[in-house]
Image: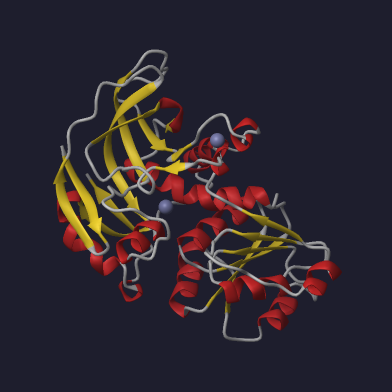
Amino acid sequence: MRAVRLQAPGRLEAADLPCPAAPGPGEARVRVHRVGICGTDLHAFGGRQPFFTYPRVLGHELGVEVVAVGAGVALEPGQRAAVEPYLNCGTCIACRSGRPNCCVSLRVLGVHVDGGMTEELVLPARKLHPSARLTLDQLALVETLGIGAHAVARAAVAAGETALVIGAGPIGLATMQFVAAAGARVIALDVNPERLEFCRRQLGVAHVLAATGEVEAALRDLTAGDLPTVVFDATGHPGSMRAAFDYPAAGGRLVFVGLFQGDVTFHDPQFHRRELTLCASRNALPSDFARIIGLIEGGRIDTTPWITHRARLEDLPTAFGPWTRAETGVIKAMVAV
Ligand SMILES: [Zn+2]
Ligand SMILES: [Zn+2]
């Protein structure tokens, strides 16, 4: 079975893997058709993904087709599905409280266990979210969109609110789309003018701010002096995360979608005076996957701006390197298997 494996940082190589066994009870064997590339993959390639072990078959943003099912599985061969790549234990406190996205022993496909840069996989059938209407590309985008959808759900964004999204990379862009789908107004903030232009042109974001200017004053101008009621940080940058405490309105919420492997400090009086609510957002819930598929099917989430680069699996060892460089303008690269 054809595959591409990350042998070590910077070394992505073609590999020949054994075909997976027949699916057991509750499992499905799937043919992988599309693999989306995201920041996690780029960091793993660059050797900057903490706790990452090599060799590893990457790939957690997948558009698949069911080829065989085990006992007790309602799916049928030929059905297409998005994959929820978060393999959870089912018994820990998080799993017992309906939050498998933050399972205490979570294993993510393509990160902690081998993922989808290969022809076939056997997966728990409950991790497959089928759709007869989404294209394979769209199915592979569902996981990325899920990160934004879950962040917006964490903040319970309501219609009529104004939300600031800091960071206009894929996670920020997904967050902006679901803020807009919730009927709230989006303000995008980034250091990169090209990314802000992308938000304006491709996502129809009306208000974009350069992170180099007087951000708080500009936010007050856009909100009749109030400041945004919700702020999302999708940068994973400690300086940005610290500054983000200055931007929510009194009584507002701050959501850290991007993560940083270290300490983030903040000025407590600022946090207390405004009685802010701070939340982390990690991965996405099974219900987020089903909801996103419904929103794409209903035309409420537009996936056309997303895919900027493409490659075939066999070309990946040479195609991948350039995607790690910002100047190539990659938003989402999509691999056909
Ligand atoms: Zn991803
Ligand atoms: Zn668990």
Above-or-below relation of 179 to 100: below
In which quarter of the view is residue 275 placed?
bottom right
Furthest residue in direction right, as rendered: 273
x, y percentage for residue 90? 54, 29
Q: Quadrant of ligand 2?
A: top right
Left or right of 199 on screen, residue 2: left
**Residue placed farthest to the bottom in the image?**
213
Q: Which colour style is shown?
A: secondary structure
Residue occupying the point 41% across, 26% down: 125
**Quick one: 163 or 261, which is closer to the camera?**
261
Place of residue 145 in the rendered image (x, y in percent of width and height, measured from the top left): 49, 50
Q: Give the side of residue 336 with respect to residue 250, left or right.
A: left
**Quadrant where the N terminus lies?**
top left
| Quadrant including the C terminus | top left
Q: Is residue 301 visible?
A: no
Residue 135 is left or right of residue 169, and the answer is: left
Q: Total marks drawn? A: 0
| Corner quadrant of residue 329 | bottom left
Locate residue 285, reporting x and y percent.
Answer: 56, 40
At a point 19% along the width and 31% down the height, the residue shown is 19
Q: Residue at x 72, y 83 (%)?
A: 217
Pick the front one: 200 or 310: 310
Q: Residue at x 62, y 33 (%)?
A: 98
Tell me if I can see residue 138 in this picture. yes
The answer to which of 201 and 187 lies nearer the viewer is: 187
267 left or right of 204? right
